[in-house]
């Protein structure tokens, strides 16, 4: 019997001569809502994921900070990492000033031990003395190979009346990470160069280049070491990306809200047209509760079906776009082909937001119908 009711309501909406076009428009709107949500979340998520991957490939998944006095702890961590063959770099990081001719710029210098491990972005074209990003090269108007001077304001030689120490370094080449925060303020040199400048044979950081290492370190050393993940070190960027995603979902959730208002209008008109048929079902012996449950289930099913169709169409569109779309972005963009990242969270939000909003308004329409229309009074009025 329930299937017969469903066929009747479906035929009335889509095939009847007096079919309600506003309700068909609302169904199309629900399909568009879930389609838009999954497409936008996947494309924006792909762009954000690519940005994070580029930054992590340079800065690693996390860093362990040490005091120069904790040499025993450093050796203990290094021994653990070497035993498990985890990729890491021994590093002395310092905030210095880079000078070329009359140009000065602050830089974060990473002195790495080239004998243990070299990250892929340095290994690809070789690493001899020093590497600077292309943005710093433009800023200082330098063309490798060239000699520059590293100046440390916090390390001074009192013999020369507290003059800041300096070290000459040869820039072998430049590179471009496509991450502005890295390209404008970071450079990489041999560990011995920084150690000579600060006059210390220790390191103050170990940088991790494998995600699973973080969990292993936390399990092994717990609170004995100061470990910061990439997300903790770049908390501002992570927060900005989350805010961007939230605003995007909020705006499209508001669009679903407006479409659901159309659902209410369409359903109220739909009820006014089928009230005679519902009265007939009641007269023929169908209980009021059965009629209410059946048409309520049908309306919720319409919402579920509409949102599901939009979601399926969205995933299909993303698959085709990812595999067959040409490079549509100009050459100045890093990602000339828009990256796609379909996640379970994105699919869930794309389904739940329009479905829950539409369900709320469907429920409101059902309650409004029960309040405004009494089948017994309607039969009496017809008689």
Image (cartoon, helix red, strand yellow):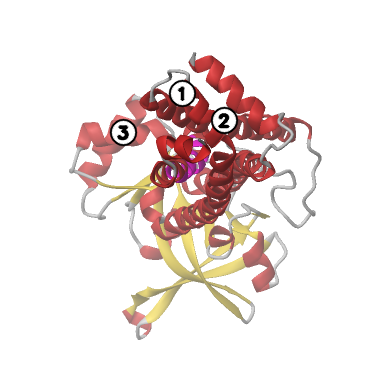
Q: Judge from the rendering whether residue 149 lies leftward or rightward of residue 156; answer left or right.
A: right
In this rendering, is residue 54 above or below 146? above
Of badges 1 and 3, nearer the viewer stands: 1
Q: Secondary structure at mark 1?
A: helix
Cα–Cα span, label 1 and label 3: 68 Å
- Cα distance, mark 2 to mark 3? 38 Å
Q: Which residue is mark 1?
A: 283
- Residue 213 against residue 101 in the figure, above or below: above
Q: Identify the residue at horizontal 42%, vertical 44% (top origin).
A: 360
* Residue shown at 49% from the left, 17% from the top: 2
Residue 31, by quadrant, is: top right
Q: Are there few (<14), some (14-19), or many (20+) residues within 10 Å of tag 2? A: some
**Mark 1 or mark 3, earlier in chain:** 3
Q: Which badge, 1 or 2, comes first in the chain's sequence?
A: 1
Residue 14, image x and y in percent?
69, 31
Residue 129 in sight here? yes
Reading the chain from its start, which is encountered first: label 2 or label 3? 3
Q: Which residue is identified by label 2? A: 308
Membership of 382 in magenta stretch: no
Residue 350 lies in magenta, yes or no?
yes
Q: Residues within 10 Å of mark 3 (few under 14, many from 20)?
A: few
Tell me where the magenta segment starts and ends, as one range.
Answer: 348-361
Residue 208 % position (x, y): 40, 40
Determine the residue positioned at 41% across, 77% down.
164
Numbered tag placed on residue 215 in the rendering: 3
Q: Nearer the viewer, residue 280 or 178?
A: 280
Q: Look at the numbered disc 2 and give the secondary structure of its residue.
A: helix
**Is label 2 or label 3 in front?**
2
């Amino acid at each position: 019997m329930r299937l017969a009711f469903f066929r009747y309501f479906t035929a009335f909406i889509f095939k009847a001569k007096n079919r309600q076009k506003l309700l068909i428009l609302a169904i199309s709107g629900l399909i568009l809502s879930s389609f838009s949500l999954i497409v936008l979340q996947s494309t924006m998520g792909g762009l954000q994921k690519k940005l994070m991957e580029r930054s992590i490939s340079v800065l690693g998944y996390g860093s362990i900070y040490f005091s120069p006095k904790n040499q025993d702890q450093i050796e203990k961590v290094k021994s653990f990492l070497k035993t498990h063959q985890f990729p890491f770099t021994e590093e002395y990081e310092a905030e210095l000033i880079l000078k070329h001719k009359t140009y000065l710029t602050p830089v974060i210098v990473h002195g790495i031990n080239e004998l243990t491990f070299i990250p892929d972005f340095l290994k690809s074209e070789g690493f001899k003395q020093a590497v600077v990003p292309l943005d710093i090269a433009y800023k200082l108007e330098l063309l490798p190979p060239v000699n520059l001077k590293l100046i440390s304001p916090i390390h001074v030689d009192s013999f020369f009346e507290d003059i800041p120490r300096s070290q000459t370094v040869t820039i072998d080449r430049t590179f471009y990470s496509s991450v502005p925060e890295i390209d404008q303020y970071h450079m990489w040199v041999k560990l011995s160069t920084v150690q000579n400048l600060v006059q210390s044979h220790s390191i103050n950081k170990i940088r991790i280049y494998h995600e699973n290492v973080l969990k292993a370190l936390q399990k092994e050393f717990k609170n004995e070491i100061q470990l910061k993940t990439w997300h903790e070190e770049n908390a501002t960027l992570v927060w900005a990306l989350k805010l961007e995603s939230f605003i995007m979902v909020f705006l499209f959730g508001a669009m679903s809200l407006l479409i659901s208002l159309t659902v209410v209008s369409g359903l109220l008109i739909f009820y006014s047209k089928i009230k005679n048929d519902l009265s007939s079902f009641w007269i023929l012996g169908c209980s009021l509760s059965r009629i209410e449950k059946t048409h309520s289930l049908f309306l919720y099913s319409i919402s579920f079906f509409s949102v599901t169709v939009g979601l399926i169409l969205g995933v299909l569109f993303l698959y085709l776009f990812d595999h067959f779309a040409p490079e549509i972005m100009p050459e100045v963009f890093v990602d000339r082909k828009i990256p796609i990242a379909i996640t379970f969270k994105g699919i869930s939000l794309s389904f739940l937001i329009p479905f829950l909003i539409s369900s709320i308004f469907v429920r409101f329409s059902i309650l409004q119908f029960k309040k405004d229309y009494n089948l017994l009074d309607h039969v009496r009025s017809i008689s």
